[in-house]
Image (cartoon, helix red, strand yellow):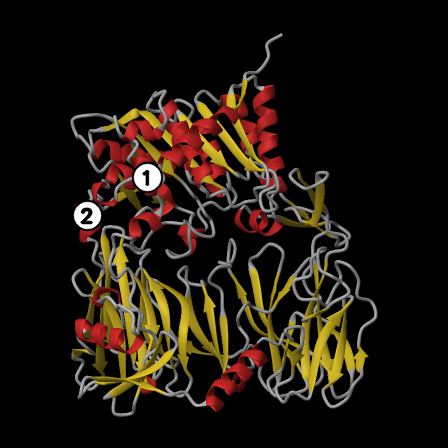
Amino acid sequence: MKYPLIVISIFLGTLCSTVANAQNPESIEKDSITMNALDIQDNDGLYKYILNSSIYLNWIDNGKAFYYQYDTKDEGDVFYLVTSNNWKKVQLFDNASMAKKLSKITGKEVEATHLKIYSLDFSKSLNTFTFNYDKKKLQYNRLTRRLKEIKVKKEESNNKSYLRRLSSHNDSWKSYSKDSLYYVYTYKHDIYLHKTDESDSVRLTYDGAKYYSFNSGYTASHDDTLRHRPSGRWALDSHKYFVIRKDERKVGTMTLVDNLAQPRPKPKTYKFPLPGDKNVTQYEAWLIDADAMAAKKVKMDKYKDQKLEIPRFNYDAVSSKYVFLYRRNRTCDILELCGIDINTGQVKVIIHDENKPHFNDQLISFKILNDGNDIIWWSERTGKGQYYLYDQEGNLKNTITSGDFVAGPITKIDTLGRSFIFEGYGREKGINPNYKFYYKTSFDKNDVTLLTPGNGEHDIKISPNGKYIQDTYSRMDSAPKFNICDMQGNVKLSLGHCDISDLLAKGWKYPKLITTLAGDSVTKLYSVMYEPYDIDTTKRYPIIANSYPGPHTDLMPWAFATDDNSNASLAQLGFVVVTTSLRGSNGRRGRDFHCYGYGNLRDYPLADQKGTIEQIAKRYNYIDLNKVGIYGHSGGGFMSAASILTYPDFYKVAVAASGNHDNNIYTQWWGETYNGIQEKTDSLGNISFDFKVKTNIELADRLKGKLLLITGDVDNNVHPASTFRLVNALIKANKQFDLMVIPGKDHGLGDDYYNNLIRYYFVKNLLNEPRDPHQLLHK
């Protein structure tokens, strides 16, 4: 009888800890640091060589002016004042002069290049400002250049102390009506109403129970003896309160064992609905009338195993007539905006939307405006997500945005001006369609205006008066730039740019941005490729794919980062590393791209990843296609294992961390949404659901290369059983592999030990080097 060869990789710990100790920057003279020592550090280690990675604007007088700090090599932080009437930068003070003045007042030596001045408070004329320094309140006059100390009134100090005490009072378990006459709370799973001018609370429900609770975010670990905040909201200025209750009593459980618990290992059991389960979470809507001191369950049953949801952070989903919520069916292709009449409790379907094969649950949204007379609704009905305007009764008024691009989340709404600012993807031709831009459009006509010019990933902050935006944009091959733009997209002022000259001088290099074609030979795929900084193009280098296939996102570094996901530092060990946004991986490119993996949750990204590697290797002859590796975490771990098992002659090494190798035991929403679930009705009208998904377990007998499986033993997201089932299948197939179980770790594994574990595995098995990564850096 043959026995499988299983290498339990505990020995890696010794070598990995050696790497971690050798990386201590304190043991290296600062002036002698080279990228060979820097490259293995994390982002924080590299960012000390960067000036102005971000700029924060301090607006004055509702947008009349602003000041900001800009770091320079010679002077340190330079403070600038800008007024919106002329957009000229004026230096607030000379650093050397200010340092001398501060030294004189405080009696302490103050360095001009290290001024720590914060929270400037300007006068109306902008000629003077005050700030706190060394426990003193100081005032500086820009005209006379005089700095003086201001005595703080005792009453002011006492008042601040009172405010601190007041803010420390914790009554977060109370949910107050707008006029503060009532508040509601939960106690032992039931809901209570309290009238603030009376001492007694009224119990409104009597059937609350464990896993059938009105408590917001209830878990088994909640202390039932404490009061908690309900998962609901008040309807505007009314005394009507709306709440959703989840019934998880019949939902199955999962169990973990905390092996590090003292004195004995401790089990942890939690509710976890699986795809295809007969018993899944059920939802109820309740309406509370505070004046009548009554609670009533709302009749909302329509779809079997439907989900009722108050959208996160959408606190204005109410009007004087309705409370609004989502109702969606289990197959995730029907979505309804429902209004519950706050007076009668009757339910009205305001908007009924269908989207095959499933909704984009990352981007769906709505906004209730003007007391419900305007409803902004996001839909992928055309294949690309756009916004539509409805009235409170569900009548379509007009299309707000349209075109061959995706309209993303709304950033700011101007109800009086009937316009809003939103994210958009793919509208700017010739630019990576994944990059985020910002636009402005009106409610009533399709007049989209670009607010953020510049090729890259954008991020904005809006001035208090809503007239200007601070735009930061960058790419992985371009450090951040900072502009002030108006609401027509005109650049009013360049604030400067991120200075990485010191980082470049140390030998750091930008990664390459690569465009390839997907398996259909039409769809463009976008990658970031990292290389050794001292690459010798006459040599051959193994290539490693760092993968995350989505489908809800791709985890791609669209904006500038020095060592995103440690890919750049991995490359310095002698590899080319590539990460790619694959078909099916995110919703920024529309429904067809996002839903590409529907019905094939295991295999959909594999050919695109392999094809991308092959296309890159044809362009760069220093890439060795005989030495290909792949690694990833979570969905990326699932994909990495699937890749080496599907293409065993192509991939030589794979590291699969926390992978959902068996999606039959991963969470319900993931599998049923992205792989799909079939609804069936028998001759008696009984509805059931059928779920089928491919797993990595089915491919275990195909393993040829080196595979390292990693899992934390208390992972309550992707249960360790998913890894252990693949382990079991590999054992049955008599395959050799490596396994690392990290005690005390949940789904988040990203520490130094974990990163070094991956590095060493590739060094040993792709470079065939017996030495640890630190030794390789100094050979």
The image quarter in which residue 718 lies: top right
Q: Position of residue 436 (x, y in %)?
A: 33, 61
Q: Spatial distance from mark 2 to mark 1, Cα to Cα?
A: 22 Å
Q: Residue 32: tell me if it is visible.
A: yes
- What secondary structure is marked by label 1? helix
Residue at 20 percent across and 78 percent down: it is 92
Position of residue 46 in the picture relative to residue 371 (left or right): left
Give the label on residue 336, or none: none
Q: Earlier in the sequence, mark 2 or mark 1?
A: 1
Residue at 32 percent across and 39 percent down: it is 27
- The quarter of the picture where the N terminus appears is top right
The image quarter in which residue 15 lies: top left
- In the displayed structure, 39 sits above or below 740; it is below
- The quarter of the picture where the C terminus appears is top left
Q: Residue furthest front?
A: 107
Q: Position of residue 431 (x, y in %)?
A: 24, 56
- In the displayed structure, 248 sits above or below 346; it is above
Q: Position of residue 314 (x, y in %)?
A: 53, 72
Give the label on residue 504, or none: 2
Question: On the image, numbered disc 1 is attached to which residue?
Answer: 27
Q: Amino acid at mark 2?
A: Leu
Q: Amino acid at mark 1?
A: Ser
Residue at 61 percent across and 88 percent down: it is 237
Q: Position of residue 231 (x, y in %)?
A: 65, 69
Q: Nearer the viewer, residue 667 or 460?
A: 460
Q: Nearer the viewer, residue 763 or 360?
A: 763
- What secondary structure is marked by label 2? helix
Q: Nearer the viewer, residue 175 or 350?
A: 175
